[in-house]
Amino acid sequence: MEDLLLDAIDLALLAELQRDCGISNQDLAERVHTSPPTCLRRVKRLHAAGLIERQIAVLNAEKVAAVLGSGLTAVVEISLDRQGAESLDAFEARVAQDRAVQQCYRVSPGPDFVLIVHAIDMPHYLELTQRLFHSDANVRNVKAFFSVKRSKFGAELPLAG
């Protein structure tokens, strides 16, 4: 990102899009006090610069679980035997490809990774642990914490300004 300068309008656009990426360009332009063509051009520039990685719908996990019959969220700590760059990268790449792994953080100190995992039910979670953790000879320790209630969930990054 060579010399990308963000002004107050860019920051306002990013803030608004973090709250609701489905907003129309017309409404977004009104909220940030600019014209629709200028708004669209700036949003495209923010996409091209990679500041906006993607736009998604955030589902309410509890309501989806109520409709589909179940749902399980786990925070999983993983410690590896070998922490060389190659071993860490290989584990990270493997778990990042799994749809049940919603978030993956390489952390320090303590465990090597913290994962946020969503599974349909406990049998699905057990199958996931066999596939991702127990079959990997480099995984030394797995510690899971199961969510009983989601108190807060967000994806908004704090922005200066």
Image (cartoon, rainbow, N blue to C red):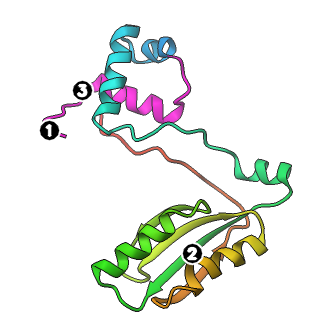
* Amino acid identity at mark 2: Val
How far apart are the two marked residues, 3 and 1, measured between alpha carbons?
15 Å
* Amino acid identity at mark 1: Glu
From the image, tell me which residue sits under label 3.
7
Tell me which label, 3 or 1, sits earlier in the chain: 1
- Quarter of the image for the C terminus: give it: top left
Which residue is drawn at the image coordinates 85% and 48% (left, top)? 67
Which residue is drawn at the image coordinates 47% and 36% (left, top)? 18
Badge 1, how many Cα within 10 Å: few under 14, some, many 20+? few
- With 106 as the anchor, is 8 left or right in this view? left
Would you say residue 117 is visible in this rendering?
A: yes
The image position of residue 129, as x and y in percent, is: 63, 79
Q: Give the label, 3 or 1, closer to the camera.
A: 1
Q: Are marks 3 and 1 in contact (CB under 8 Å)?
A: no
Magenta-colored span:
1-24
Q: Are marks 2 and 1 in contact (CB under 8 Å)?
A: no
